[in-house]
Image (tube, helix red, strand yellow):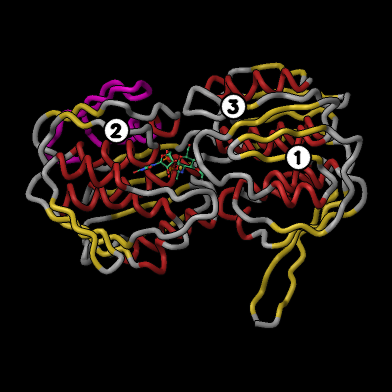
Amino acid sequence: MVSNEELHVIGQSILHGEVYVSGAKNAALPILCASLLTPETIVLKNVPELNDVKTVIELLKQFGVKVSKNPKEIIIQSNDINNTEASYDLVKTMRASILVLGPLITRFGEAKVSLPGGCSIGQRPIDQHIKCLKAMGAEIQIEHGFVIAKSKRLKGTYIKPDMITVTGTENLMMAATLAKGQTILDNAACEPEIVDLANFLIKMGAKINGHGTNRIKIDGVDYLGGADYKISPDRIEAGTFMCALAATSGSITLLDVNPLEMTATLKKLHEAGLQIEIGNNWLKCNMYKRPNPVNINTSEYPGLATDMQAQFMAVNTIANGTSFIKENIFENRYMHVPELKRLGANIIIDGNNSIIKGVNYLSGTIVKATDLRASASLVIAALAAKGETRIESIYHLDRGYEKMEKKLSMLGANIKRISKRIAE
Ligand code: EPU
């Protein structure tokens, strides 16, 4: 027998109250990996309790990293590394595991990291990580399903990935911190999570400039030290709660957010009809009407994040008109569409384009979560739907949302986690 869990949602509750936004998953993962760059103690605060965070901690432990926790912080010590191999078992469950490649090769001169393999949202190759690390002097072979990298001290140089890649930028920035000389990383991703990682590395003693722009300059140093750092808020979690409000109605306040990092999302939510009051670290939102349809064209930051596409689609399914969505980052990020259709949505897909004709109401049924953001879109749709929706396979949700159903319950949603035993 294996255990599985479902969410049971009875839709159309009005949302009210305050909700704290957790630390950003996509900042926590690279920052945890960056702790491999120093033998000194790292103390991290605001690390979200997520399955992806557990996976990366397991991975670090496989290298000999000591990790301890108290309710407020995670303490990491990488002074006794006895292994530089990242096994398939962990890498296959989380592609972000590739983020150990840069730190391991630059600090220890070797790394063996399993290739991540298939992914539900797209092929997601790592060729650009490899191309640029090779340009810095690493010898890299792909053998028996592993990336096997060796190097004397990496050399700073000019590198330019062929496309903008978030984890690629992070891997290369980490690798360059301990390289000899200056690295110029062109075509860099500008996401706030890159800036968070850079700020953490700077606290460790790295010399980095230009983070948050497309050209990052890193002057390699001989040694990085310990640091105490607080992870920034999760802009995608915040946007997800706001989409939930747009699809239902009520009044909620998000606390511990950084509105400055959410400009594209806030603009679209305003277009959808949300009234938003913006504070320095809070957002007060009201919604008392059927949402307007909003067109979405995903792009790299500062454009609208692909990680918000599925949630906006859920809102559009019940909007008072037709909307168009174009997914430009991943080739297969419409896995939520067949499930939204089971709830009564009217969506036509043509390649990476989709047309959503808003329906008067969705009606609850059984749906299956297929990836992290697809799960979030199903939760939003279920909150909007008439009657009961059961969302299966919610382990995807637990990878990237901390206590989502608890936070939504506190806001007045009728949502419960049910454990189900299934025969193997
Ligand atoms: N790409 C390549 N070759 C590479 C690297 C990327 O072809 O070597 C392509 C990808 O296949 C994709 C595009 O470039 O088509 C952009 O991918 P990117 O590398 O930026 O994505 P990622 O770094 O693998 C991160 C986030 C994703 C988020 C994307 C885009 C983390 C841990 N993951 O992935 O987050 O969707 O950037 O913003 O930071 C999520 O949280 O749900 C999630 C999937």
Spatial CA span between label 3 and label 1: 16 Å
Q: Is residue 49 left or right of residue 55?
A: right
In the structure shown, which secondary structural element does the residue marked by tag 1 occupy?
strand
Magenta span contains residue 218? yes
Rounded to the nearest angstrom, the CA distance separating label 2 from label 1 is: 47 Å
What is the secondary structure assignment of the residue under circle 3?
Answer: strand
Q: Quadrant of the C terminus?
A: bottom right
Q: Which residue is located at x 45 percent, y 57 percent?
A: 94
Q: Is residue 91 above or below residue 11?
A: below
Residue 319 in view = yes
The numbered dot on residue 347 is 1
Residue type beneath disc 2? Lys
Q: Which residue is mark 2?
A: 203
Nearer mark to the viewer, of 3 and 1: 1
Magenta stretch in the rendered image: 196-224
Nearest to N terminus: mark 2 or mark 1: 2
Label 1: how many residues lie within 10 Å, few (<14), some (14-19) or many (20+)? Answer: many
| Residue nearest the viewer, comparing 209 with 120 | 120
